[in-house]
Every structure is written in C-alpha cells, then in structure tokens.
Amino acid sequence: MRLSAPVYRLKRKAKLLSRSQNLPLHAALDQVAAAEGFARWSLLVDSAAASPAASLFAALGPGDLVLLGARPGQGKTLLSLELAVEAIKAGRTSAFFTLEYTEVEVLARLRAIGADPVSLADKFTLDTSDAICADYIIAQSASAPNGALVVVDYLQLLDRRRDTPELNVQIRALRSFARAAGVILVIISQIDRSYDPAKKSCPDLSDVRLINELDLGLFSHACFVGSGEIKWSPVSAVA
C-alpha cells in the first residue's frame, strides 16, 4: 500500500492534529494511520520500512548500474538518498556525488527522510566537487568495498563539460567500474520535457532526456517515479 506522503510528513500531520484537537499523540498517529488504510500507526511504519527503497535495494546486487528517472518534484533525489541509507542499514557504505546540490541541501534532504547525517558520517560520503565526471567518481570510489552503493546526481550534468569524454564513454566506464569493483551505481536522470503525464502516468526509458547519444542498454536496471508510482525493471525487460 503506497502512502500519500512520506512517514515524516504524516508524523508532522499527526502532531498538528494532536495540538488542534487536543488528542494524545498516539491517538492522533493512529487516526492518521487509519486515513492511510492501517489499523495502527505501528503497522503503517512497518509497511513503510519495507517499501519502496528497501524493496528496490533488496533487488539490486554488486555490479548493477541503475538509471533512476523522474520529473522535478517527484522524489527521485529523496529515493536515491533512501537507497543510500538502506545500504548503510545493510552494513555497507554509500556515497552521493552531486553536481546539483550543495552540502547543506543534501544534509537537509537526509533529515527530511528521517536520517541523522551525524550517525551516518563514517558510512556515508558526500561529494559536491565541480570536477565530478566518470573518471573522478571512479578515482574517488576506488577503495569502496564490495556492495557499496554510489549515487550520481545527475546523468545530464555529466555531459555538460567539453573537457570530459562523451556521455556514452563515461557511462560505459562507470559500468565497467561497477562490475569490476562490485559496487552498485545509481545514476539519477532528468525526463524530457515532451513527456506528458496525462498520457502516461509514469515515464520510461523512451522519456529520458538526452543531449547527446547514449546507449541506455548499458544500464542493468531502470527505475522511474511519477504520479505516486515507482516502477522498476531490468533494462532488458523494459527496453
């Protein structure tokens, strides 16, 4: 069952309800849970813990190269950070390379999904360098242990500089690295402006925004977020 909002927002809603109606917090939490289709708040939390990031992470393995795409505001960055947290919960490490956000913005998003950046410090690496490209990511991740999860934010920004290889070459290099090092690489992607959610609720590979040519078959999995849905599949099954 998909929630209407992340757990932290539902909890905030319950706190406001508790104050406005002078209810005990546990009663307000259960009331919010009931509106989401759960008998008790604890059942809602248990359900949320198993999906969707946990389910997606469980389906991935060392060497996978994942494309994670969505329109702005659909939650692709938060989902990628949730995957990074899931890796840490599983006893692994994770890293987030971003050309889009500042350190302060990423830490705020970690808090938004209920993660404590301080407690993640020794397992989570955040890199906001302007030098980010495939070679840079590979060099910085050279010592990453088998099973580590690396997020790249985002695909189209890897293609913005003239002093780096073309995008197809970079993605091929990242795929080779993922396989050789046994890491899971998740690359966030924009969706083309021509995509119309009124015609198709969730985007797919045909909607990925590409400035230059890229063989999307290089990815092992594709995950798309749209209209409250999260769809993912091995690329061979969706291409």
Image (spheres, helix red, strand yellow):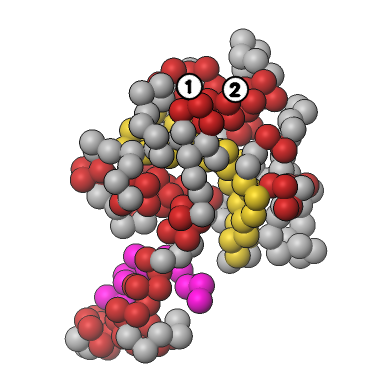
Q: Nearer the viewer, residue 231 or 65?
A: 65
User: In this rendering, is residue 183 above or below 78?
Assistant: above
- Tell me which residue sits at (33%, 50%) in the image: 90
Label 1, residues with CA under 10 Å away: few <14, some 14-19, many ≥20: some
**On the picture, is 15 further left or further right than 181?**
left
- Residue 97's mark? none
Which of the labelled discs sits on residue 173, or is there none? Answer: 2
Residue closer to the observer: 63 or 171: 63
- The magenta span reads 1-16
Locate residue 84 relative to residue 218 in the image: left or right: left
Q: Which residue is drawn at 69% across and 60% down?
A: 202
At 37% from the left and 77% from the top, the residue drawn is 44
Three-letter code for the amino acid on which mark 1 is drawn:
Ile
* Cα distance in 3D space between marks 1 and 2: 8 Å
Q: Residue furthest top?
A: 163
Say which residue appears at 65% left-offset and 15% top-offset.
Answer: 165
Q: Give the left or right position of residue 216, taking residue 66 as reference.
A: right
Q: Please give the residue where the numbered disc 1 appears in the rendered image.
A: 138
Q: Is residue 136 magenta?
A: no
Q: Earlier in the sequence, mark 1 or mark 2?
A: 1
Which element is circle 2 on? helix
Which amino acid type corresponds to the residue marked 2 in the rendered image? Ala
Residue 115's spot in the image, x, y percent? 29, 52
